Amino acid sequence: MFKYEKFNASSIVTAPAVERVVEFSPSGLDAGDVARVLSLAVDGKVISSEANDGFADITGRVNFRLVYQTREGGVRGVDYNADFNLKVEGNFTGDDSVSAEVAVVEADVTTGDSVVLSAVVSVRASAVQRTEEECLVDAEQCYKTVDTVRLPALVAAKTVSVSVSEEAEAGDVDSVLLADAQAVIVSAVAGDGKITVEGKVRAAVTYTEDEEIRIREMVVPFTEEILADGVEEGDKVCASAAVRTSKIVLAGVPGANIIRFDADIAVRVSVVRCRETDVIADMFMLTNEVELGRENRKFTFFGGLKYVSESISGTASLEDRPPAESVIAVPYARCFAAKAEVADTGALVEGVLTADVIYRDENGLNSVRAEVPYSVEIDGTFGAEVRAVCFVEEIKAKARRGELDIEAEVGILLTHYEVGEAEYISSVTVGEEKERNDSALSLYIVSEGDEMWDVCKALTATPEDILAQNPTLSVPLAEGDRVVYFRTLA
């Protein structure tokens, strides 16, 4: 009599970001030998993530890369890792497959009796929760209305490794001080049985040549075709990229070295498809009372990706320091998106561009950490929510008296999300027989918002019978319409 179907559905659950201070004091670094800090490059990544009921347990790692000038005037670079663990509270269950991202909000280094490296990291955890929804799709010997609901379902989720390599000519390299690399997705498109992902990696290699600081920048595009059963053209894709490992290899001959950058990029994709399904929205029986079990589900799911490039500029004050004579290098730069939201004409992204600028003044080498706030409006049609990942494509600094001019091209990857709602009947309980209406005549006066369905339920009659007895009645009904219904009494 009643027909049900089971449908798989998925929804993205994201917990509020949690900030944590991570500190590390390297035991092998002599604080007395650090005359001046020239750059502190900091990145964070997730080592493991485990879902529990009500929270996610995240283990992460912060990588500190310090470039400093020694008391004797030399320049050195050191590399350290510091692990951390935290709990991110959210609407998670122990069965979820949770993922997390780590962003560095602030970083600092202090020198005294010891060198202390510190970073403020922001950790955001999310999971795609899968459920099975049982919906009423047909009911015999009943009068019913049908509605179409959209149920998003996770089709595929994969993480693959992509290897990239690039070379740059250099002179006679004394030592590599710092290798800074960042990866981003530019596009991700679903096809039949595959996802085609395009992205790029930017590497900035800072080194010394004849005791002078030099820098080589490389941008490496990549394309990867990821095979995934069940994926179809038109499916929505969410994708991210992160540098898993990287290394610098010196080749060539003395006086004409080649700097080779090798990196392993972790590319993560998730694919969602929205299925439109006809379900019974409401029903009644002429003979019996019915009790309907109703469900109302809200789903958050991927709406798509958009990558844009924007120009950001600003100044960094040298305050009471001597004027800069020339800029030597920008060894480290990051763009942090503190806010991303849907606006009237598209999306609004706000944040801070951070860069370490090494320059020369009358006293020799010096450096400043530049912080340039930005606010960017991106045209387009987005869903209910957006999230932003920023990528420094190119950055330059120019010396002016008392300050430095900063100009950067920044890529912004927007992932937008849709929020849907599905209401359906999950169970029907047939109750007692309806009391017989012994009235030969019933009158129903239509109120504002009433539909034919409301009239039928009130009079326990079919739409066909009501229209047959009221030939002048038109649909949709109007407030004040009079509906007369005659019954044949045995």
Image: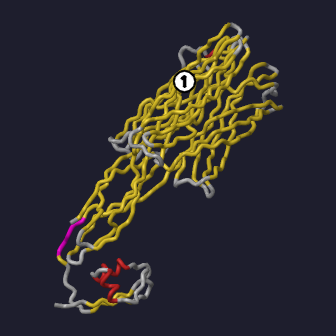
| Extreme residue in the bottom direction | 440
Q: Could you say which is closer to the camera, residue 456 or residue 209? A: 456
Which quadrant, please, contains the C terminus? bottom left
Let me know if residue 64 appears in the view: yes
Q: Is residue 278 left or right of residue 26?
A: left
| Extreme residue in the left direction | 490
Residue 41, above or below 428: above
Q: Position of residue 34 (x, y in %)?
A: 65, 17
Q: Position of residue 413 (x, y in %)?
A: 58, 42
Q: Is residue 356 left or right of residue 271?
A: right
Which quadrant, please, contains the N terminus? bottom left
Residue at the image point whose x is 19% and y is 82% from the top = 435
**Magenta span:** 428-432
Residue at the image point whose x is 43% and y is 45% from the top = 232
Q: Could you say which is closer to the camera, residue 81 or residue 108? A: 81
Residue 143, quarter of picture: bottom left
Residue 298, above or below 270: below
- In the picture of the structure, the residue carrying the numbered disc 1 is 263
Let me know if residue 116 appears in the view: no
